[in-house]
């Protein structure tokens, strides 16, 4: 039973990721709302703005049991005479935090990083899951919409679309809100925005497939991170077509069993777009265990000056940092980002080591001060029964 609960928790973490990490193309309302593409972002949306949400999801199976063909099973079909075994069908549920950072924003558009955080033992310290990003018009998409746009929407019901103005309460605060809901036979998606600011207050999803998956996210607040590199430009070498290559290891530890499994890891980075404040890239990660075929995974990611870390940072900002300096402290995830060391590395480069840490997660990012590139990365994610350790060093690029 314990192993089944752990599997359910793992499935729930995946469900949270799929539910709240938006794809690179956010919802585009420019075709139905005239002038949207010419509108700016709301005043409160700036590089370094962070939106935080409480996220939860649950999968409700269509049935509580299933029968699987098995010659040694206890159940016999009345007409076929075939034997079956009965297995219970379990749902999955989980909860965590979703944080959205504004990496860059200007009149051309916005670039947002989305990080889901899961509880390491369901109610213990938070650890990050796989990040995603979304790019949209400056006026907004999934996570905010310019309030001038919302003011133009007319209430309606029918045809699979509902637009409804309504009061919406979170804690002790009641917002003047608008709910935009789309519905089909297989899915319902609803978003609630604050009419005054345009901030996404809540989202609710229900998707029918193998059972029904319900997911929700409720706003915990918005704050502005005071990062040392805000307003600065990324280095000039960062452009479309530039590339980086890292080598390292991915290690799984089971302390109670004194077990450790270390697998060589190669990570290739190819920048697909870049400007002075933000960038996108394609990441290819390859694990090469001895005696087994290599396994590769490719995904799309983004970075920019609006995050407390990343692949590349402005060199001038790195040069201004001092040991012990606190860069950011997040009350929701418990993560403190600080400068833990300033030193020359083995290759003679002047480096700065920045650490992001809470009770269950620690990541150290080492940057070359002159180029702004991350030359080393080490992360520890502590689980209930096992720990994951990732180590990488730059071998080419930058």
Image: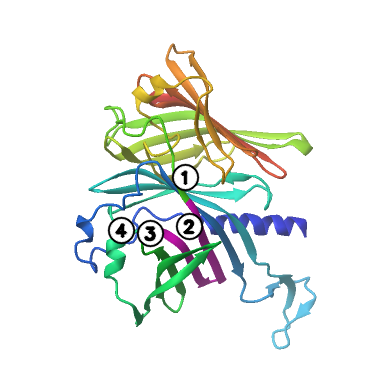
Residue 391 in view, yes or no = no
- Please state the horizontal and vertical placement of residue 249, each as a whole percent of the image: 56, 31
Query: Label 1 to label 3, Cα distance in Å?
Result: 27 Å
- CB atoms at circles 2 and 1 under 8 Å apart? no
- Please state the horizontal and vertical placement of residue 183, each as a whole percent of the image: 42, 76
On residue 142, the disc is 3
Give the camera-side residue of 212 and 342. 342
Query: Label 3 to label 4, Cα distance in Å?
Result: 11 Å
Q: Which residue is mark 2?
A: 20
Q: Look at 77% across and 60% down and name the residue there.
A: 1
Question: Start and end of the magenta stretch?
Answer: 198-221
Instruction: Give the mark nearer the N terminus: 2 vs 1.
Output: 2
Instruction: Give the mark nearer the N terminus: 1 vs 3.
Output: 3
Q: Disc 2 on helix, strand or loop?
A: helix
- CB atoms at circles 2 and 3 under 8 Å apart? no
Q: Is residue 203 a member of the stretch shown in magenta?
A: yes
Instruction: Give the mark nearer the N terminus: 2 vs 3.
Output: 2
Q: Which residue is mark 4?
A: 146
Q: Is residue 18 left or right of residue 292?
A: left
Q: State which mark lies toward you, 2 or 1.
A: 2
Q: Is residue 274 left or right of residue 59?
A: left
On residue 85, the disc is none
Crowdedness near tag 4: few (<14), some (14–19) or many (≥20) residues, C-alpha within 10 Å: many
Q: Disc 1 on helix, strand or loop?
A: strand
Q: Is residue 2 a member of the stretch shown in magenta?
A: no
On residue 297, the disc is 1
Q: Look at 77% across and 78% down and name the residue there.
A: 75
| Residue farthest top in this picture | 348
Give the camera-side residue of 65 and 20. 20
- Please state the horizontal and vertical placement of residue 181, each as a whole percent of the image: 41, 73
- Prevailing SS of the magenta stretch: strand
Q: Look at 47% across and 20% down and name the residue there.
A: 322
């Amino acid at each position: 039973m314990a192993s089944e609960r752990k599997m359910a928790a793992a499935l729930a973490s995946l469900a949270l990721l799929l539910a709240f990490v938006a794809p690179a193309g956010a919802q585009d309302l420019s075709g139905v709302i005239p002038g949207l593409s010419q509108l700016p972002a709301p005043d409160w949306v700036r590089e370094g703005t962070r939106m935080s949400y409480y996220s939860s999801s649950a999968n409700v199976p269509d049935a509580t049991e299933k029968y699987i063909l098995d010659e040694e099973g206890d159940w016999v079909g009345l007409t076929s005479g075939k034997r079956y075994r009965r297995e219970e069908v379990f749902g999955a549920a989980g909860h965590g935090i979703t944080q959205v950072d504004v990496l860059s924003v200007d009149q051309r558009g916005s670039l947002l990083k989305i990080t889901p955080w899961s509880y390491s033992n369901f109610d213990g310290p938070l650890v990050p899951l796989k990040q995603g990003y979304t790019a949209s018009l400056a006026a907004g998409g999934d996570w905010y919409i310019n309030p001038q746009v919302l003011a133009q929407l007319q209430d309606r019901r029918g045809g699979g679309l509902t637009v409804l103005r309504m009061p919406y309460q979170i804690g002790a605060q009641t917002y003047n809100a608008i709910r935009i809901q789309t519905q089909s036979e297989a899915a319902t998606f609803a978003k609630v925005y604050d009419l005054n600011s345009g901030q996404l207050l809540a989202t609710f999803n229900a998707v029918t497939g193998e059972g029904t998956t319900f997911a929700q996210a409720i706003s915990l607040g918005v704050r502005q991170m005071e990062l040392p590199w805000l307003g600065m430009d990324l280095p000039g070498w960062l452009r479309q077509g530039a590339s980086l290559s890292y080598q390292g290891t991915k290690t799984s530890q089971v302390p109670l069993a004194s077990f450790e499994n270390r697998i060589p890891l190669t990570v290739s980075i190819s920048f697909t777009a870049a400007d002075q404040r933000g960038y996108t890239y394609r990441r290819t990660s390859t694990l090469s265990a001895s005696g087994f075929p290599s396994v590769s995974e490719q995904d799309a990611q983004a970075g920019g000056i609006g995050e407390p870390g990343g692949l590349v940072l402005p060199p001038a900002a790195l040069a201004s940092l001092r040991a012990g300096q606190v860069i950011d402290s997040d009350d929701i995830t418990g993560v403190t980002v600080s400068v833990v060391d300033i030193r020359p590395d083995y290759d003679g480069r002047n480096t700065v080591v920045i650490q992001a840490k809470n009770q269950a997660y620690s990541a150290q990012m080492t940057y070359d001060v002159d180029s702004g590139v991350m030359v080393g990365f080490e992360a520890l994610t502590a689980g209930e029964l096992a720990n994951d350790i990732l180590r990488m060093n730059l071998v080419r690029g930058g």
